[in-house]
Image: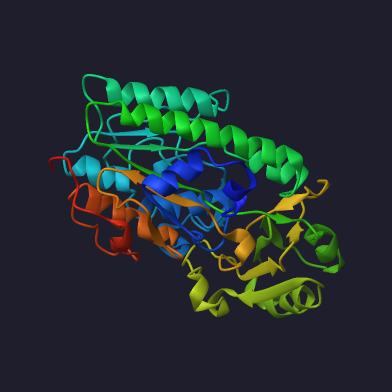
Amino acid sequence: MRHDYPTRVPPGGFARLAAEGATADRLIPPFPSQTFSGHATLATGVSAQRHGILNNRFKDRVKGVFSYRDEARWYDAMPVWIHTTRLGLRTHVLQWVGSRGPWQGTEPALAPPFDKSVDDDDKLDTVLAWLAGPQPPRLVMSYWYGCDKAGHGEGPDASEVTDCIAETDARLERLRAGLAALPIPVTLLVVSDHGMSRTLGTVNLYRAFEVLDFAVEIIPSGPIAHIFVAPERLAATEALAQSLPHVTTWRRDTVPLAFAYRHPTRTGDLVLMAEPGWTFDGRNAEPLPGVHGHDPTSPDMGAIFFAWGDGIRPGSRVTQPRAVDIVPTICHLLHLPVPAGVEGRALEEILAAPRGDP
């Protein structure tokens, strides 16, 4: 859900959340602005080099290849659902990335396994039922599909995306109304993991590296690719990568510090990034019209941010919050200490004194 998507539909759910609560110009995702790394940062409050989920697909030199895995054990940093559970708060997690199974011996009270047949309306109904039940959780985290599929499949400017935005807008209004009807105070945070750009072209790394007379391992995921190669072959591989159009190449220890992407066992010997609008394709994959994963400060990569309900100051606004700010904001609202090492801050400019009891 790109940051400007809500402006493409008549005022409804998004507009009401903003008027009665808080919003932002855009939420800055982590690097890379991809689904799995984004959700991991939203859940841990730290960057990819700290939580270890470098992309939707990556390789760990010890554990092997990660490809859309859902096990919490892949997280190097503690998810907030573990933090709240350890502090005694009942927590439910509905198909959030990396929420399956225990993390260092702890699991939330409820975390159903991922099921792609469960749509966003089903998730909405489940969340409301949990909160209306005899043991309402203190924290619920839920992943919704939103308009990612439409953006990839049709491009971000397509009418199909606008139709999806309108459906999501109505769904959020139904959620807000359901929360408002509950007999308990509730705070709602609505964020997305990344934006979307129109695809300009693709770079086929498999074909490009065929000219080498030695083996390289290529792990592409959107516009980011990790290259693994023997040390004595690194210079030749780097030279070839640097010759490719629309591609920036770094060694593991020269990836810009601002990207916070130097993981000790998961960052490749080389990291390649396609320029905005470009991406790396699979071996024979057709390019999708929409792409994301680029520099998170690029406007097209910006995500949405809305906050509403208990503890939120009506009509407030924050300019460019970051994904790492969500965990400390949740902790503030729940009157909990922030986990050690969290890189973000509580968004105090949108916070009011909560109405409910701690």
356 displayed left or right of 25? left
Q: How many marks?
A: 0
Q: Is residue 155 above or below residue 296?
A: above
Q: Position of residue 253 (x, y in %)?
A: 53, 78
Q: Is residue 319 above or below residue 11?
A: below
Q: How is the image coloured?
A: rainbow
Out of 311 and 334, give the one closest to the viewer.
311
Q: Quadrant of the C terminus?
A: top left
Q: Position of residue 34 (x, y in %)?
A: 58, 54
Out of 272 and 195, give the one closest to the viewer.
195
Say whether residue 113 is visible.
no
| Residue at figure coordinates x 27%, y 41% from the top left | 105
| Residue at figure coordinates x 61%, y 70% from the top left | 269
Q: Position of residue 195 (x, y in %)?
A: 60, 54
278 displayed left or right of 348? right
230 displayed left or right of 352? right
| Residue at figure coordinates x 41%, y 35% from the top left | 100
Out of 327 and 185, give the one closest to the viewer.
185
Say whether residue 353 is visible.
yes
The answer to which quarter of the image holds residue 217 is: bottom right
